[in-house]
């Protein structure tokens, strides 16, 4: 092949790469925005935004066993390429406070985000919430506990704003701690475990708190649609946790799609592969 043709091909490929990069522009990022302060403990969020203003909002809640993790780990930032604003929030860990502090903090973030939509240029007419593992549990609970007073709290104020959300994306989160105390007693009941630290005791002992932390216990006819991802080889949070909320949603006649990843464990890149991104995008397009 003549050198001139090779050079033209190389230039063409370079142009394609440059155009692809332009189409996947980096989001505008505002980090460490304080949305509440609890006894000197600052609760912050990071905001990822597209170039356009007025787009819908997706709130991400990170995992980490309610004892660790970071808002900087946000696998849904790619949604800004499709016009969505993404807020990745923090919450108090179990070394600072036990449940229901964590859901109070998440609801505080939703209220704050609604109160500040004009300042930051996104829309909260409808809000999606998503999370993985511990964050999935909190996202699911946000979804089913809209207007449940005992879980609302007063953290951060903005009590004139609603903490209800309009759709939920739950990546392998626990939804029924009473069931978990039976199917995974070594995880839910044993001293020193993440669940034990969350509830301040085993789920078999802290029964009322275990029920309050379980999204399935608050399902009602006006709850939002769910998209749930779970690996069938997950040994940390068993698949039966997602099957349980699917069962309760089915009984209530509510929409929930459960996508089971064959061979997948608790988390990993597989959950954010292209075909599952497409499922997320289609779900958000339908419900936001």
Image (cartoon, rainbow, N blue to C red):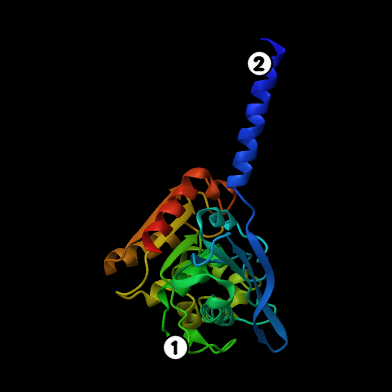
Q: Residue furthest top?
A: 1
Question: x and y percent of residue 135 in the render?
Answer: 56, 67
Q: Earlier in the sequence, mark 2 or mark 1?
A: 2
Relative to the observer, which residue lies in front, 36 or 196?
Answer: 36
Residue 252 makes an appearance in the image = yes
The quarter holding residue 236 reads bottom right
- Name the residue at 52% across, 75% down: 203
- Horizontal and vertical percent for residue 102? 58, 78
Q: In this rendering, does residue 68 appear at all?
A: no
User: In which quadrant of the rendered image does the N terminus lie?
Assistant: top right
Determine whether 134 is above or below 282 in the image. below
In the displayed structure, does residue 70 sit left or right of residue 116? right
Between 82 and 72, the one nearer to me in the picture: 82
Choose mark 2 or mark 1, whichever is in front: 2
Is 6 displayed left or right of 202 in the figure? Answer: right
Query: Is the residue under label 1 in contact with that under label 2 (CB below 8 Å)?
Result: no
| Mark 1: secondary structure | helix
Residue 76: image location, x then y, percent = 56, 57
Q: Which residue is mark 1?
A: 149
Q: Residues within 10 Å of mark 1 (few under 14, many from 20)?
A: few
Q: Nearer the viewer, residue 185 or 65?
A: 65
- Circle 2 crowding by C-alpha within 10 Å: few under 14, some 14–19, many from 20: few
Q: Which residue is mark 2?
A: 5
Q: Residue at horizontal 49%, vertical 58%?
A: 238
Residue positioned 32% across, 62% down in the render: 255
Question: How far apart are labels 2 and 1 at the CA level?
Answer: 70 Å
Q: Is residue 210 above or below residue 74?
A: below
Between residue 20 and residue 157, name the one nearer to us: 20
């Amino acid at each position: 092949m003549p050198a001139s043709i090779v050079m033209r091909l190389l230039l063409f490929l370079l142009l394609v790469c440059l155009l692809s990069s332009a189409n996947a522009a980096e989001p505008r990022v505002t980090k460490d925005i304080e949305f509440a302060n609890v006894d000197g403990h600052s609760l912050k969020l990071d905001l990822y935004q597209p170039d356009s203003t007025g787009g819908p909002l997706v709130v991400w809640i990170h995992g980490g066993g309610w004892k660790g993790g970071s808002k900087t780990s946000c696998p849904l930032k790619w949604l800004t390429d499709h016009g969505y604003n993404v807020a990745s929030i923090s919450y108090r860990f179990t070394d600072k406070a036990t449940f229901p502090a964590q859901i109070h903090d998440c609801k505080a973030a939703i209220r704050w985000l609604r109160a500040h939509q004009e300042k930051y240029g996104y829309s909260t007419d409808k809000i999606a919430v998503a999370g993985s593992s511990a964050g999935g549990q909190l996202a699911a609970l946000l979804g089913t506990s809209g207007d449940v007073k005992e879980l609302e709290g007063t953290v951060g104020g903005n009590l004139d704003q609603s903490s209800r959300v309009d759709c939920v994306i739950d990546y392998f989160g626990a939804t029924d701690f009473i069931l978990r105390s039976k199917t995974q007693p070594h995880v839910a009941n044993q001293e020193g475990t993440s669940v034990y630290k969350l509830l301040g005791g085993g789920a078999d002992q802290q029964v009322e708190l275990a029920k309050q932390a379980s999204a399935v216990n608050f399902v009602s006819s006006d709850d939002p649609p769910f998209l749930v991802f779970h690996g069938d080889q997950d040994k940390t949070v068993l698949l039966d946790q997602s099957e349980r909320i699917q069962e309760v949603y089915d009984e209530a006649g509510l929409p929930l799609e459960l996508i089971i990843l064959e061979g997948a464990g608790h988390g990993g890149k597989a959950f954010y592969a292209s075909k599952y991104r497409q499922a997320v995008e289609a779900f958000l397009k339908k419900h936001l």
